[in-house]
Amino acid sequence: MSDKVKMQFKKDASIRVTGTVDFVDADGNVVETKTDFSLCRCGASKEKPFCDGSHRDAGFASE
Ligand code: FES
């Protein structure tokens, strides 16, 4: 299995992250580790920084 993390920009939707990522605070402490998740890029999610599907109702459009 590869250690590389893949970020896929989905058309009219989120950024799909495949792999395991450490979330680190300003002091360098790991506050959470997540595997395979989607990041919001429309700004409408109530679960930021994660996508909660709100981009559909927001009519988000992208390439
Ligand atoms: S991209 Fe899905 S809620 Fe923003």
Image (cartoon, grey):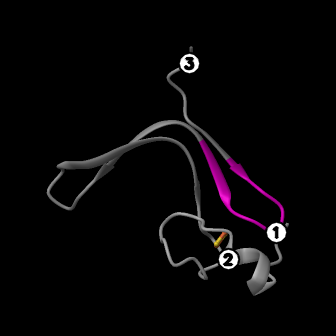
Verify whether residue 9 appears in magenta: yes
- Packing grade of label 2 (10 A; few <14, some 14-19, many >=20) is some
Mark 2 or mark 3: whose residue is earlier in sequence: 3
Query: Separation of disc 2 and disc 3 at Cα?
Result: 31 Å
Q: Quadrant of the N terminus?
A: top right
- The answer to whether 62 is drawn above or below residue 23 in the figure is below
Q: Which residue is mark 2?
A: 54
The quarter of the image that holds ligand 1 is bottom right
Q: Mark 2: which amino acid?
A: Ser
User: Residue 40: x, y in percent?
Assistant: 59, 68
Name the element at disc 2: helix
The range drawn in magenta is 8-17
- Between circles 2 and 3, the one closer to the viewer is 2
Q: Residue at x 67, y 77 (%)?
A: 54
Whether residue 10 sits left or right of residue 1 in the image: it is: right
Image label count: 3
Q: Looking at the image, which is closer to me, 28 or 14?
A: 14
